[in-house]
Image (spheres, grey):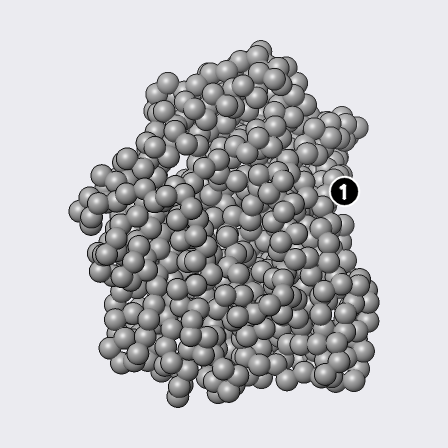
């Protein structure tokens, strides 16, 4: 049923499985090694559930030293390694292969240090995104990137994919909020890039590592930047009679020099799905909804909202509803952040992640609707409008192979449209296996060759997450 | 030494290919105002980006600008000013400390990752850089990133190019995200604080919810905290901040002109510009470690300094004699888990003392591996960052 190809697994590695398991057992205690069939099955896929491959074994190290030992073993014995945080990747970034082990960071959940005066925090890679903010919330601090999966996803996975989230409009994505990492290379060498101070001189190996999808090494620790919470935050719902009007309002707000903390967009199908799930009070009589969040003191929020409302009125807004309480605020964000899960209750879906210049939003929304209609499918749009990062959810039935194929082809067409409009294939989910073969629509072969040669400086034998990011044809090793 | 001045990216690529065929290394130069930054390069020719200039587009509604590398900063700033926008990282102008003439370029701001006081809130140049085109050492034009703010497609060669000082490629075109200019800015000043008290004040400000966009201290002079935004909001936040800073002293609003020149001086390190024959170190540490690091260096060596980034950035001037203080500076900096760069020193010093923080063995191996993957014959700015790379 699958449209995405996997490389042929190496039969000689699979034949050595017993030896490999024994080798790992010499490094890790029994509770850190998963070998039974039914237990390994929990690691055969991530949030791209249409694809699954059973790994040779799953290693769950507790320390950087154990990660390093496992990698050194795999390096010396020719075994591929797929690193895994919480397995929430939508692009298949954590899907393993039959000839690879999964290296899971789920036992590395320690908070190593909080330094409020310098506004930094050091954590192990398996700490969840929300776990970081939760640890400092009572003291008035937070960690800014907030992907929808933040309850489950790990900081290690966020670093692998350079994750975003609604509040990145003001505060930047993962790469703008990480000061340093500790990482084990494939030969077991442990390196540190960056640290508690800003802007390490030398090549920006930290910047190169973030978003490298587990291909350069396995991140075991991170130093993150903490921010002080604003005095208050208030999301406001703006309902519009058309997606185009909402899109034009976004461009006008930003054009007027106002950068709210977040501007989220939902079309009518998405509003209905999310409202049915979260009962957040989203208006059901509009075609498009913007959630715009402002922050500051009450007076500051009132002033900024006044300016935004004025612009929205010029764009035909029909509903304006401010959150009146913390409970209401939580519900509004719960509805938005559970959009993917809520959609999953009514249908299977694939979620696209292209980014386009904000001026192109109306054009690309229209094109998306046309593409999906052409394949006879339905789509719900819920995305980060302020930065043009779109998330069309293409609804289909995963038990129908023909429909799955149509959904994947529609997704490809949408991403090609995003690139054509001046954007990119993925804004925050990563390339993974999902968009690997589309890379030549955005890059020339020379661009990809250069990236692969740099990759080879870290992992010359392509042991680390090898089936991802780069098209399977024309690969370059050291 | 000959001067090459390509007018297009393909001309530049031809010149790099020819230089590679002749094994004749190139020194890359923009406006030449930062020629003193980094180790001296042994090159046959200078490749200038002077003719590789011009704004490709500025889309105010999308908050993005794309320009060719040799575009003067003055041209970029004028274009952005016209739409009340700016580069959010407040790039330093190095002419004061080097006594250089000429026009700084946008390409150098990207290639050298040049930031200023706003770095603490607006990110560094590398954070605002969202797209880059460069010619690698094989003479192949390469693109990475694009024109959108969120883009995780492929390895991030944009970040790798920022701060690589041209050793990984001739940057030909850059795309930056922009921010709307704040409607107004005001600065609270405290005076005559000792270093420890001053950094405590800056730490309190930066740990507040009031979005401080500049936090600097000149020993013996002003300790400044800058606020930006709508005027009514500044009144409110300023009052709250004054109350918060009371334990350290009485904070008063600076006059507008005084504040503007204060931040320009901090950005360009003017208080330490003279004498020009002194060595100048740029030291990045966790902010609260700043006073300890400065004191440790001053205990062993004649030194003057100032703090930016709430104490996290120390600019320190010391006589350019012996190792220009390298051993002492690096020991004090490392003990605080920071980094030191020898931003200004005579050519002889920069040849004998590591200018950039010496990488660990593993980091050096990766650095050399990346250099070899991009520029195998070491044609572009060889040795600018580290000997042999």
Q: Image quarter for residue B298?
A: bottom left
Q: Image quarter for residue A474?
A: bottom right
Front one among A137 and B261: B261
Q: For this view, does B294 lie left or right of residue B54?
A: left
Q: Is residue B167 visible?
A: yes
Residue at the extreme left of the image, as rendered:
B247
Q: Which residue is mark 1?
A: A420
Is the C terminus of chain B in the top left, top right, bottom left or bottom right quadrant?
A: bottom right
Q: Position of residue B63 (x, y in %)?
A: 61, 41
Q: In the displayed structure, would residue A241 be above or below residue A112?
A: above
Residues packed near mark 1 inside 10 Å, few (<14), some (14 to 19) or many (20 plus): some
Q: Image quarter for residue A417?
A: top right
Q: Is residue A185 visible?
A: no
Identify the residue at image location x=40%, y=86%.
B321
Q: Chain of mark 1?
A: A
Is the N terminus of chain B in the top left, top right, bottom left or bottom right quadrant?
A: bottom right
Q: Position of residue A252 (x, y in %)?
A: 61, 28
Identify the residue at image location x=37%, y=58%.
B308
């Amino acid at each position: 049923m699958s449209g995405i190809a996997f490389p042929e697994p190496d039969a000689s590695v699979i034949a050595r499985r017993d030896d490999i398991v024994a080798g790992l057992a010499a490094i890790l205690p029994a509770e850190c090694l998963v070998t039974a069939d039914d237990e390994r099955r929990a690691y055969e896929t991530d949030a791209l559930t249409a694809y699954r491959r059973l790994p040779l074994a799953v290693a769950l190290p507790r320390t950087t030293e154990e990660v390093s030992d496992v990698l050194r073993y795999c390096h010396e014995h020719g075994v591929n390694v797929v690193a895994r945080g919480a397995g929430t990747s939508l692009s298949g970034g954590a899907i393993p292969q039959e000839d690879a082990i999964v290296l899971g960071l789920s036992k590395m959940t320690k908070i190593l240090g909080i330094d409020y005066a310098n506004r930094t925090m050091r954590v192990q890679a398996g700490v969840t995104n929300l776990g970081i903010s939760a640890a400092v919330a009572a003291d008035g601090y937070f960690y800014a990137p907030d992907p929808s999966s933040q309850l489950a996803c790990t900081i290690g996975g966020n670093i692998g994919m350079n994750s975003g989230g609604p509040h990145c409009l003001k505060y930047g994505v993962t790469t703008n909020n990480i000061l340093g990492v500790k990482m084990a290379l494939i030969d077991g060498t442990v390196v540190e890039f960056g640290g508690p101070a800003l802007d390490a001189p030398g090549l920006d190996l930290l910047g190169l590592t973030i978003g490298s999808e587990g291909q350069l090494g396995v991140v075991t620790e991170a130093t993150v930047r903490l921010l002080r919470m604003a005095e208050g935050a208030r999301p406001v719902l703006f309902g519009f009679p058309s997606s185009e009007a909402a899109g034009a309002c976004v461009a006008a707000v930003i054009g007027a020099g106002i950068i709210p903390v977040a501007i989220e967009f939902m079309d009518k199908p998405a509003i209905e799905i999310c409202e049915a799930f979260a009962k957040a009070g989203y208006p059901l009589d509009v075609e498009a909804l913007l959630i715009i969040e402002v922050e500051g003191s009450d007076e500051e929020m009132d002033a900024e909202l006044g300016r935004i409302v004025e612009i929205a009125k010029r764009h035909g807004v029909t509903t304006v509803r401010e959150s009146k309480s913390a409970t209401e605020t939580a519900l509004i964000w719960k509805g938005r952040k559970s959009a993917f899960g809520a959609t999953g209750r009514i249908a299977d879906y694939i979620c696209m992640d292209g980014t386009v210049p904000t001026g192109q939003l109306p054009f690309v929304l229209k094109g998306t609707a046309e593409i999906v209609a052409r394949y006879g499918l339905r789509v719900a749009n819920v995305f980060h409008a302020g930065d043009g990062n779109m998330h069309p959810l293409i609804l289909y039935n995963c038990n129908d192979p023909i429909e799955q194929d149509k959904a994947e082809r529609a997704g490809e067409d949408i991403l090609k449209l995003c690139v054509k409009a001046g954007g990119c294939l993925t804004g925050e989910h990563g390339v993974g296996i999902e968009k690997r073969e589309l890379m030549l629509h955005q890059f020339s072969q020379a661009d990809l060759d250069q990236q692969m040669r740099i990759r080879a400086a870290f992992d010359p034998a392509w042991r680390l997450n090898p089936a991802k990011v780069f098209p399977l044809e024309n690969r370059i090793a050291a | 030494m000959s001067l090459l001045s390509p007018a297009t990216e393909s001309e530049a690529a031809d010149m790099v290919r020819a230089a590679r065929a002749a094994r004749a290394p190139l020194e890359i130069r923009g406006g030449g105002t930062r020629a003193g930054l980094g180790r001296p390069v042994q090159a046959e020719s200078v490749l200038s980006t002077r003719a590789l200039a011009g704004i490709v587009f500025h889309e105010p509604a999308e908050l993005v600008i794309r320009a060719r590398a040799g575009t003067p900063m003055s041209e970029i700033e004028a274009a952005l000013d016209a739409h009340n926008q700016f580069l959010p990282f407040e790039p330093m102008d190095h002419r004061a400390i080097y006594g250089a003439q000429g026009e700084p370029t946008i390409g150098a701001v990207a290639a050298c990752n040049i930031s200023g006081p706003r770095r603490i809130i607006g990110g560094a140049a590398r954070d605002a850089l969202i797209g880059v085109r460069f010619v690698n050492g094989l003479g192949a034009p390469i693109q990475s990133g694009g024109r959108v703010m969120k883009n995780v497609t492929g390895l991030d060669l944009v970040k790798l190019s920022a701060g690589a000082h041209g050793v990984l490629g001739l940057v030909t075109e850059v795309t930056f995200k922009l921010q709307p200019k704040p409607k107004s800015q005001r600065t609270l000043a405290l005076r005559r604080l000792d270093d420890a008290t001053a950094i405590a004040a800056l730490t309190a400000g930066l740990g507040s919810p009031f979005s401080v966009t500049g936090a600097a201290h000149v020993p013996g002079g002003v300790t400044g905290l800058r606020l930006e935004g709508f005027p009514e909001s500044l009144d409110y936040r300023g009052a709250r901040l004054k109350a918060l800073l009371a334990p350290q002293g009485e904070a008063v609003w600076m006059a507008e002109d005084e504040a503007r020149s204060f931040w320009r001086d901090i950005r360009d390190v003017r208080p330490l510009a003279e004498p020009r024959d002194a060595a100048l170190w740029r030291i990045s540490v966790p902010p609260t470690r700043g006073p300890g690091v400065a004191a440790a260096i001053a205990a062993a060596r004649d030194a003057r300094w100032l703090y930016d980034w709430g104490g996290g950035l120390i600019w320190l001037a010391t006589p350019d004699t012996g190792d220009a203080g390298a051993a002492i500076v690096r020991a004090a900096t490392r003990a605080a888990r920071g980094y030191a760069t020898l931003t200004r020193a005579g050519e002889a010093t920069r040849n004998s003392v590591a200018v950039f923080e010496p990488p660990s063995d593993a980091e050096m191996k990766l650095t050399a591996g990346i250099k070899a993957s991009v520029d195998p014959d070491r044609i572009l700015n060889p040795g600018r960052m580290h000997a042999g790379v």
